[in-house]
Image: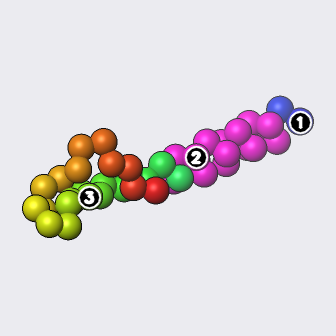
Amino acid sequence: MKKLMLLSLALVSTAMAYGQNILTAYIKDADSQEPLVGATAV
């Protein structure tokens, strides 16, 4: 039972590590092409 719990924990932590990708986006004003401070990309 302990081995099963340890295996489950290892699989879940591995899946969480792969799910932490980084998205970098630059949102700019259409007219001036200046970056918009505080804008969020979802």
Q: Nearer the viewer, residue 16 or 4?
A: 16
Q: Is 12 left, or right, of 31 in this rendering?
A: right
Q: Position of residue 23 (x, y in %)?
A: 36, 56
Give the quarter of the image for residue 13. Answer: top right
Element on which disc 1 rests: loop
Q: Amino acid at mark 1?
A: Met
- At x 10%, y 62%, the residue is 32
Q: Which mark is residue 27?
A: 3
Query: Of circles 2 and 1, which is in front?
Result: 2
- Mark 1 packing: few (<14 Cα in 10 Å), some, or many (20+)? few
Q: CA distance from mark 3 to mark 2?
A: 28 Å
Up/down of 40 relative to 31, above or below: above
- Mark 3 packing: few (<14 Cα in 10 Å), some, or many (20+)? some
Q: Is residue 12 magenta?
A: yes
Q: Nearer the viewer, residue 42 or 34?
A: 34
Q: Which residues are magenta?
A: 3-18
Q: CA distance from mark 1 to mark 3?
A: 50 Å
Q: Can you identify the residue that label 2 sits on?
A: 16
